[in-house]
Image: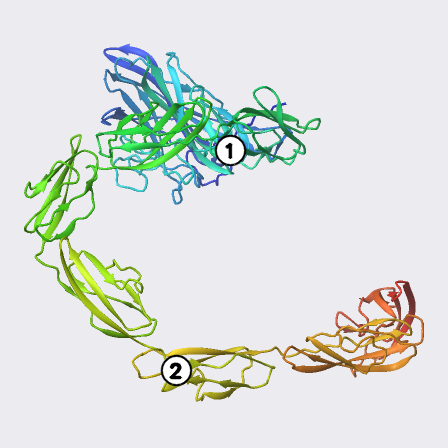
Amino acid sequence: MKHFLLLILLGAALAAKADHITGGEMYYTYTGSSGGMHNYRVTLKQFRSCATANRQFSNPTYIGIFNRVTGERIRDIQVPLRYEEQISTTSNDPCITRAPFVCYYVGYWDFDISLPDSPDGYILTSQVTFRVDAINNLANNYDRIGATYTAEIPGTPAVDNNSARFVGTDLVTICAENSFTYSFAAQDNNGDELRYYFCDAYQTIGYVANNPGGGGGGGGGGNNSAPPAAPPYYGVPYGSGFSGDRPLGGRVNIDPATGLISGIAPGVGIYVVTVCVQEIRDGVAIATQRKDLQINITGCTIAAASLQPEYMLCGNSQQLVVANQSNSPLISTWNWEFTNSAGAVVFNSGNPVADHTFAVPGVYDIKLTTNRGLQCPDSTTAKAIVFPGFEPGFSVVGACINRPVIFTDQTTTAHGTVNYWDWDFGEPSLQTDRSSDRNPAFSYPTMGRKQVRLITGNSVGCRDTIVNPLDILDKPPIGLAFRDTLICPPDQLQLQATGTGTFTWSPAVNITGGNSASPLVSPVSDTKYYVDLDQDGCLNRDSVMIRTVGHVTLSAPADTTICQGDPIRLRPVSDGLLYTWGPAASLDDPSSREPLATTVNTTVYTVTATISNCSATDQVTVRTVPYPLAAAGPDTTICFGTPAQLHATTNGNAYSWDIIDAGLNTVVYPTETTTYIFSAYDNRGCPKPTRDTAVVTVLPEIAAFAGRDTAVVIGQPLQLNASGGTQYTWSPPLGLSALTIPDPIATYSSPNRGIRYKVLVQNTAGCADSAFLNVKVYSTLPTVFVPTAWTPNGDGINDQLRPIAAGMQEIQYFMIYNRWGQLVFTSRQNGVGWDGRINGVPQSSGVYVWQVKAVDYLGLDFFSTGTATLIR
């Protein structure tokens, strides 16, 4: 079963204040002529969300009538609202999760107009001040931008035209990241050929995005409360990844012959989508009609097998990694099958993601079946077009306003032939800025940066898109290698210019090749040469100043002294154009005007400055003086709380530590690891100190730990665990398996009222500390001792009723109950008991029942119960 998506238009999740219009269109019917006038019945249709029930459509609204070519305002009319209706639906398909409620209001304005013959035709315009808020495919900071809806009436001889009228349902739903189809099909009563394409949604007033200041009165007076602005109209500012011809991103396309939109929806949000339909009569586009909608894409999911129609492997790889586009939680199985053109299966898989590298180029069928034999089964097919080596490209010649710009396709293909071109020249003021020629020409009526897009394809089915920017200027650009230079007569100099067109240089004095881009000049005095560029009547001028000199001025920097090994920038005073320094080995760039020199020996540097055939030479001596010796002494490591001795040496005449009043040899008392800086100075010519450091590492204070006091029974092995250092020494040796490890095992053959063990803990530096542990040894079987009475009076003696385990691995629980069976205390820790309080309130004297469960050192369960008396 194939599930067709219901699409949500014009979203229901808007706040009540958002009375903004969420879409619109205008269409008309020719009703005949009388008295030299042509009559039309026009309908304006607008949408708004059902969440704006307390808002209203404009009544009346303004409609502007303009000359379609010149933009001249013919007249404005006010039209009353004829009626509005509410439509809604909710999908009951069990294979759609989180199906949304779809609801909106539709307003209709009908009116009649009579217009005289016009070779240019007319454009009818309605404008609203605000769209809905937070449209996802618009650039940031463009909330509540306005909208313009138009209809075009062609000029003579097609004035008897009936506009194309969109007839698709307005109740549609799109689930985010799922495949969908939605028809923008239109009907045309004249039988004209219809061509559909995505186009820019129009703003309200006549200005380009990010460049306010255009004229028009339609934007400022509230929704439809003022006459609309005159054309041209400009597109809304689309955000990154979106454009007028890609309003839902690169995975959604429109069929130019049917108006069917299909593909994979973008993420959750509101998206403005405008579809244009051209009416083509006898091969000529006579008019373009538009439908503008804000589509609300929701977080619903569909348990469907969903793939893109085609997967292009036309670049450099033959590997296809593809997953079902539906992420519905109702899908639990996947079955993939790839077949070649002969019908042979080349790949199959039951994984959610199919990953296959095709061995040979070709066209392959992809079939995905989901939930086979389960609820919501589905299947779909797609094509894999595997022809690597297809690379789109184009070049541009020309960049002048109102002059032809030549576009040349440079697409290359390793398979088939390039046979498809769809150009969009990126001119926002025109709807005719498109071409299907291979190498078209286009004249731009406005300046600025244009985004030129080419969709190109080949005969084996590859398609790809390339977008390049193009700056349209009012004059052809001229590139000059330099604009100001020197020459030493009688030498020659070659001027260098770049650009498209015819070059002319002036004055025609001491110049050869004045009509080329790179003439030779040999001026004998200062001369400014002008270059004029003519590109098909589009003119530009630039200039190059050439100053003449009789010799080269050069003065090397003064001799200097530096610290040995330090870099120094050599800065001569000169009007030279080219420089040569030596010796080159100690210079970063011997041909630089101001090279960086790094030397350990006194060095004489020679510099030659050149202007054409003239040159001059000079020298500079760089003397080096070694840094003074500074040695702070070796790094050292000390125990926490002990001093450290620093031993420094120097051959300088002065020194200092970053500690106060310290000599070469000094004692420091750091409490943490510290770096001490020693600086040495001298008066031999190196003004910089030498520095060295001594790091005193302070080992952390030893936290010696021998373990907690415990009790065992005869024959029970006791694992001791000391910590805090790297070396351990235990004493006395009674019962211990080893004396120099952190974790010896103690075993006992006789009882003992208490053995006090000491462990000496040392770190890597020999720092030491001690810890102690008491062990009692009982001659009983493993047991848990619990006293028969306790006195919680705070004297530190018998203040808690607690368990004392002997021969136990763990206490699983120790619980105490009062006389009414209420649990008053529970614990799992040996030696932790109850102090006779509940929520801080002392309990009365009396008998309490206890229970204990433990596991002995052999792994056997132990259980005991008894009573104890609380004595106050």
- Three-letter residue code for mark 1: Ala
* Residue that badge 2 annotates: 680
Disc 2 packing (10 Å; few <14; some 14–19; many ≥20): many
105 relative to 587 in the view: left or right: right
Quarter of the rendering containing residue 410: top left
Of residues 549 and 784, the one nearer the viewer is 549
Tell me which colouring the rendered structure shows. Answer: rainbow
How far from the left and from the top, in percent, is residue 284?
A: 31, 16
Of residues 638 and 686, the one nearer the viewer is 686
Residue 468 visible, this angle: yes
At 21% from the left edge and 69% from the top edge, which residue is drawn?
Answer: 620
Kindly identify which numbered label has been placed on residue 265.
1
How far from the left and from the top, in percent, is residue 211?
A: 29, 41
How far from the left and from the top, in percent, is residue 755?
A: 84, 82
Position of 644 relative to 275 (above/below): below
Q: Quadrant of the N terminus?
A: top right
Position of 500 relative to 552 (above/below): above
* Mark 2 or 1, nearer chain start: 1
Residue 593 visible, this angle: no
Q: CA distance from mark 2 to mark 1?
A: 71 Å
